[in-house]
Amino acid sequence: MRKGIHPDYHPVVFRDPGAGYAFLTRSTITSDKTIEWTDGNTYPVVDVDVSSASHPFYTGRNRVLDTAGRVERFNQRYGRT
């Protein structure tokens, strides 16, 4: 790798305040806010709106579409006999 062309890759905490969920990973994103992690070190923290703890697909709270009702309504309108 060439020196001086790559961004700084460092540990960062991503936090979902709505779900009360946070995880430590590595990223190139920067932040002015910091948080003390469970290992006693201080890391930059980035607040996110949606994470796997709050996304409807991963939590099972997503809407189920009534496809059977739509098919029946289509057949009533356009007459399948």
Image (cartoon, rainbow, N blue to C red):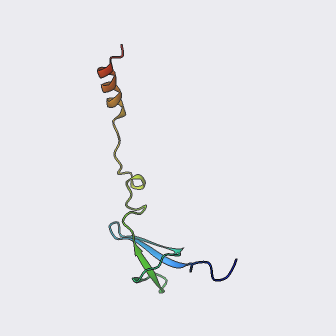
Who is closer to the viewer here, 1 or 70? 1
- Asked if 68 appears above or below 48 in the picture, the reply is above
- Asked if 62 appears above or below 11 in the picture, the reply is above
User: Is residue 24 found left or right of 18 in the rendered image?
Assistant: right
Expressed as whole percent of the image width and height from the top left, the position of residue 20 reads 35, 70
Query: Could you tell me which residue is drawn at 49 percent across and 83 percent down?
Result: 39
Residue 21 visible, this orientation: yes
- Of the 4 image quadrants, the one containing the C terminus is top left
Query: Could you tell me which residue is drawn at 40 percent across and 83 percent down?
Result: 32
Expressed as whole percent of the image width and height from the top left, the position of residue 50 reads 38, 63
Query: Could you tell me which residue is drawn at 33 percent across and 30 percent down?
Result: 70
User: Is residue 15 found left or right of 5 in the rendered image?
Assistant: left
Residue 37 visible, this orientation: no
In the image, farthest residue toward the right: 1
Who is closer to the viewer here, 3 or 54? 3
Expressed as whole percent of the image width and height from the top left, the position of residue 44 reads 45, 81
Query: Could you tell me which residue is drawn at 39 percent across and 55 percent down?
Result: 59
In the image, farthest residue toward the front: 5
Quadrant of the rendered image containing residue 18: bottom left
- Of the 4 image quadrants, the one containing the N terminus is bottom right
- Asked if 55 appears above or below 19 in the picture, the reply is above
Expressed as whole percent of the image width and height from the top left, the position of residue 60 reads 38, 51
Q: How many marks?
A: 0
